[in-house]
Amino acid sequence: MAYGNLTKMLIHTKVTRYLEFKSISGSYVYKGGKILKVPATPNEALTSPLMGLFEKRRFRSFLIYINDWNPDDPSTHKGYDLNTMTMRQLYTEYGLQPDTHQFISHAMCLQLDEKHMDLPAAPTVKDLKTYCDSIARYGTSPYIYPLYGLGGLPEGFSRICAIHGGTFMLDRKVDEIMFNESGEAYGIKSGNEMAKADLIIGDPSYFPPEKVRATGNLVRCICLLNHPIPETNNSGSVQVIIPGPQVDRVNDIFVCCVGNELQVSAPGIYVAIVSTIAEKATPDEDIAHGLKLLGPILKRFTSVSTTYEPVSDGHSDKCYISSSFDATSHFEDDVTDLLDLYKRVSGEDLDMNISAENVDGDY
């Protein structure tokens, strides 16, 4: 997201000095068996088949309210207390239809399921404002992507870390995390070598089973194509969200496709990733609706992995563990987890009031 927390985090850490970003060509949502573009301009909104004429008027009124809403200014609330009013009630107040609820919540607010509908609306409205601000910045979609692929992110962090005296041990397995008699971690062992530290930070895969608990299974399929995704106006890069309720699922299905315009593949080759949380008996059943959208597939690679979360905050054992990556392709929920991890390690919140106006800036 151009105005999302991941972008702010990259600017905050100055990693953007090593990266170049480009806007994703289009954002799409699945509705009624079709891929439909999420409107990015007023003209697109007027001609979009996502909604009928009268629904578009109600949608416009709703967006005007969202644009004006300021949590710190009661004069913009129009009598609605979004800390108690649910998202379902807010939609109903503006007369929006259930299909529109799904489209806004899943394709714009980036909610993963329907749980938010009966929770206070304020957090979801903030997510919607972030989406609208992001899409207004580039005019094509709210998403940006680093040229040459996501591998540029860890590479950028590696460079920053090295500048500040950090050391990287590449291609090394963590054979054992060492604990003292008090149960506190003090280092890791790799082969015949050991590195000592006051605390250990990592994802669940590095830690003993008793330090984490399973939260579900993630299905991800990487597909190689020789064509753009059909019905996306031959876009070289797209994000497609399939709301779970549209295909009788609880969890959404995410489809992301990138190609040579982002320098991640050879000319004429596209890389599509379909991912979701496992609900069905087989992985292919879980991602079937996403695969159908892709058209002919040259080669695909499907994996199923268990997702984990830490059983404690890390203060007692000095093991600060993140949660596993989720099924989303926009990383907003993963960044929320990283912000929580930062607070657990440092004892304070990371200042996210930094402007995301200039992703190419150096601060």
Image (cartoon, grey):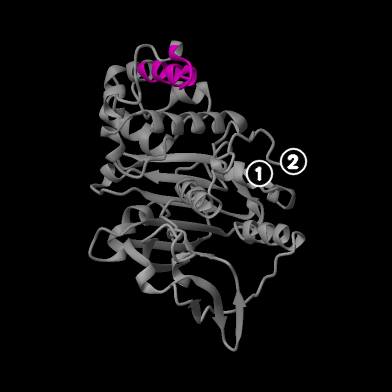
Gap between marks 1 and 2 measured at Cα: 7 Å
**Badge count:** 2
Quadrant housing the C terminus: top right
Magenta portion: prevailing SS class: helix
Residue 42's spot in the image, x, y percent?
51, 21
Q: Quick one: SS at disc 2? A: loop
Front one among 326 and 312: 312
Name the residue located 47 percent from the left edge and 70 percent from the top edge.
Answer: 184
Q: Is residue 191 above or below residue 217?
A: below
Q: In this view, does 350 lie to the left or right of 205?
A: right
Residue 204's spot in the image, x, y percent?
44, 66
- Most extreme residue toward the front is 182
Residue 332 visible, this orientation: yes
Over which residues does the magenta segment extend?
58-74
Residue 5's spot in the image, x, y percent?
55, 41
Mark 2 — residue? Answer: 363
Q: Which amino acid does label 1 sit on?
A: His
Q: What is the crowding at mark 2: few (fewer than 14 residues within 10 Å), some, or many (at least 20)?
A: few
Name the residue located 66 percent from the left edge and 44 percent from the top edge.
Answer: 12
Mark 1 — residue? Answer: 12
For the residues labelled 1 and 2, say whether their Cβ atoms are less than 8 Å apart.
yes
Q: Is residue 64 left or right of residue 113?
A: right
